[in-house]
Amino acid sequence: MNENNSPINVEYARFGSRAGAYVIDAIIVGGFTIMVNAINIANFKSFLVYLPIAIITIFYKPYMESKYGATFGKMALNLKVIDQNLKQINFSQSFLRSLILIFPAILFVPIYYLAFQNPNLLEATQLMDFAQGLATEYPIQSWISRLSFLIIIVDIIVLFSDQTKTQRSLHDRIANTFVVYENKQLN
């Protein structure tokens, strides 16, 4: 209901649009991250170059969704994240809804700290060589990746099994948020 007690029509985003937004964000953030990390591995081999990139990656979604109501991927597809009152979400809600992606990224930070101190890995000049060495030296990172993948699969299953029109995923339920088509909200 809006201020005049009349119903508000909201069209909730479907899986295809949400997945598309995720892919766009992955290309933007992933492309940037891979490029900077490749330059770092080839030239600097510095945790101090890696750390700000990790921080930007970790806070991208919470910042964008709390400040603009959407990430670049969601903006491209006219999607917006809202709360149960159809209002823009705050940083805490966005951080909470992003935890399934943020938590593994946070766990990688100490692994990369150790990696940038490891003489075996500092010999690598290519990103793929560094990644392969990282997997060998720190097998826990493979388990973190697998756990992250499993959580994303569960999130998608929850989204697909939502029999309501709201199409909420696990992370939406945790943060009490909804993803809607921005241009189809009628007040």
Image (cartoon, helix red, strand yellow):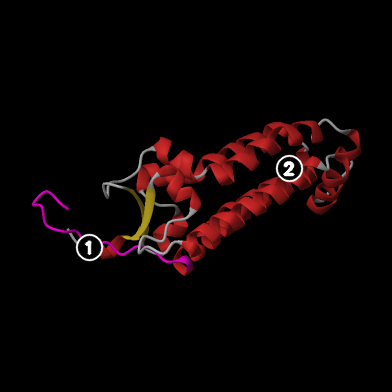
Rendering coords of residue 127 (x, y %): 78, 50
Q: How many labels does the image show?
A: 2
Mark 1: give few (<14), some (14-19) or many (20+) Cα within 10 Å: few
Q: Main secondary structure of the magenta part?
A: loop
Q: Residue 184 carries which label?
A: none
The amino acid at mark 1 is: Asn
Q: Which mark is residue 9?
A: 1
Residue 95 against residue 159 in the figure, above or below: above
The amino acid at mark 2 is: Asn
Residue stretch rendered in magenta on the structure: 1-15
- The quadrant in which the C terminus is found is bottom left
Specify whether residue 50 is in view.
yes
Tell me the residue at 59%/54% (across/down).
Answer: 152
Q: Earlier in the sequence, mark 2 or mark 1?
A: 1
Specify whether residue 57 is in view.
no
Q: Residue furthest bottom?
A: 16
Residue 78 in the magenta stretch? The answer is: no
* Residue position for label 2: 40
Q: Tell which of 173 and 129 is nearer to you.
A: 173
Q: What element carries label 2?
A: helix
Tell me the residue at 69%/48% (across/down).
Answer: 147
Tell me the residue at 36%/60% (across/down).
Answer: 166
Rendering coords of residue 20 (x, y %): 50, 65
Residue 167 against residue 2 in the figure, above or below: below
Q: Tell which of 161 and 70 is nearer to you.
A: 161
Tell me the mark number nearer the camera, choosing from 2 and 1. Answer: 1
Rendering coords of residue 89 (x, y %): 35, 43
Mark 2: give few (<14), some (14-19) or many (20+) Cα within 10 Å: some
Q: What element carries label 1?
A: loop
Rendering coords of residue 141 (x, y %): 76, 43
Q: Is residue 111 left or right of residue 120?
A: left
